[in-house]
Image (cartoon, rainbow, N blue to C red):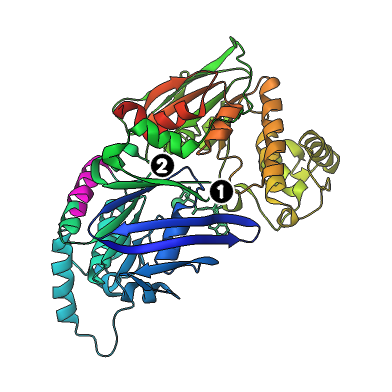
Amino acid sequence: MTLLTMRGVTKRFGAVEALTGVDFDLEAGEVHALVGENGAGKSTLMKILAGVQPLDEGTMTLEGRAVHFRNVSDAQARGVVMVYQELALVPALSVAENLFLGTLSGIVRYRALRERARALLAQVDLDLDPETEVERLSIGEKQLVEIARALAREGRVLVLDEPTAALSSSETERLFELIAKVKAAGVSLVYISHRLEEVFRIADRVTVLRDGGLVGTRALDDITPDEVVEMMVGSAVHRYQRPDRHRDERLGRFELDLAGDAPIEITVHAGEIVGLAGVIGSGRERVLPSAFGLSGGARWGDRPLRSPREAIRAGIMLVPSDRKSQGLVLESSVQENVSLSTLSRLQRFGFMRPVAEAAQTRYWIDKLSLRPPLPHKPVRELSGGNQQKVVLAKALAIEPKVLLLDEPTRGVDVGARAELYDVIDGLSSQGLGLLLSSSDTEELIGLSDRILVFRGGRVVTELRPPFTYEEVVAHVTGARQLA
Ligand SMILES: Nc1ncnc2c1ncn2[C@@H]1O[C@H](COP(=O)(O)OP(=O)(O)OP(=O)(O)O)[C@@H](O)[C@H]1O
Ligand SMILES: [Mg+2]
């Protein structure tokens, strides 16, 4: 029986069309996986379903009747509940308060509430005092509290957006047991994931989105993992790749402890771009912080990297992904930002050397084609792509030998992205070694000399050019291991 339908759903964010005429059906009591590459529109489609965002065009029906959810409580009142990718619990409140947030009115009987909370936590097999503050829970426990909260709202439709991204394997097993239980109780689930082994294990059907459009819906009994990958990536159009160049000047070797079974080793050559691929939770996201001395236990050759200071002394510099919170002082000018990392060199007897400072800034503005090329412009007034160039300039000003790039084009528009690619390519031509951590397959393929694929805290494959898009996605999602 079809419980819910979405027809012709279109959603725009300014100029971006996040969804274009998407159809989606949910059967009563099924687990329906929703897959697609980053930015395909999965979260957006489900946020529309859960009343978080309105749709621009299209219709939805629940049990055959048209519905319009104006907000989250509207959707919840009809039994549609979503557990978000970015968890939505209130850290300072207790577990019990979070469980019933927004559902309490009138006089609250705390004892009854505690009892009810205990019962709900038991349903998700969580042995926790309901009075515990949420900020003291592990991510896995928070996830389970979120699901308990969904159950508290008597959901008939439960949407889980990448629930296992931050879970350990035992927590993941627990979640799967819970999903089976919830499903047996007649609840329909939508399961968003980048991990195809999970999809094949727990889902009945899969819907694939690509670039905001529907590619198709299939029963998982009728399709192979490689076919799902094919649907995700589409027909292979020709994409730029670097020529396979031989590099033999070895800069050094990282030894990193990613909390997997054994430390991993990454050798870096001069002029080489090493791509790091893997879904969130694969260990890929821990490589660069570790290589920059942020997590302890790392080495570069025989030098320990116990702090960023030690990393910088070893010639290793990080360009962080979150440029707003980590990379830049937005109120300050381009020049002030670029000078920040080299203050000691630009000072003499505690005074800035204005000529040296201006010369350095001018050099980087030219080299990275900053637009507009104005050293005194506040960084806040630059476009995303140009802000990212300032972050790069700041990192390059210390003249590193190895540059760690974390999602260098996240949130950067297409044109500026191409320019950044040229800049990164140029840096490697000059002998810099680069580690490029990215969730963007196209970016990895276009820039990397080789690609290391991470899963479970280990490197599971090293890919060499010519890369194919399918191959990279098949390894990252785990489809290759299932085949
Ligand atoms: N609030 C927003 N404002 C502007 N653009 C948005 C917003 N939310 C999503 N987008 C854009 O809509 C598109 C689809 O995003 P969405 O988050 O749905 O992708 P996704 O498939 O969930 O990706 P991921 O696997 O990375 O979570 C992207 O291009 C994204 O940048
Ligand atoms: Mg998403």
In the rendered structure, the answer to whether residue 25 lies left or right of residue 12 reads left
Badge 2 element: loop
Residue found at x 66% / y 57%: 15
- The answer to whether residue 265 of the structure is visible from this angle is no
Between 311 and 36, the one nearer to me in the picture: 36
The residue at which mark 2 appears reads as 280
In the rendered structure, the answer to whether residue 249 lies left or right of residue 31 reads right
Q: Is the residue marked by circle 1 packed among few (<14), some (14-19), or many (20+) residues within 10 Å?
A: some
Residue 417 highlighted magenta (yes or no): no
Q: Earlier in the sequence, mark 2 or mark 1?
A: 2
Q: Amino acid at mark 2?
A: Ile
Above or below, 70 against 309 in this view is: below
Between 307 and 205, the one nearer to me in the picture: 205
Residue found at x 74% / y 48%: 336
**Mark 2 vs mark 1: in front:** 2
Q: Is the residue marked by circle 2 packed among few (<14), some (14-19), or many (20+) residues within 10 Å?
A: some
Q: Position of residue 445 (x, y in %)?
A: 56, 28
Above or below, 76 against 359 in this view is: below
Between 301 and 45, the one nearer to me in the picture: 45
Residue 176 highlighted magenta (yes or no): yes
CA gap, disc 2 and disc 1: 16 Å
Which stretch did the figure color magenta? 168-179
Residue found at x 25% / y 90%: 107
Label the magenta part by its dominant secondary structure. helix
Q: Is mark 2 within 8 Å of ligand 1?
A: no
Q: How many marks?
A: 2
The residue at which mark 1 appears reads as 322
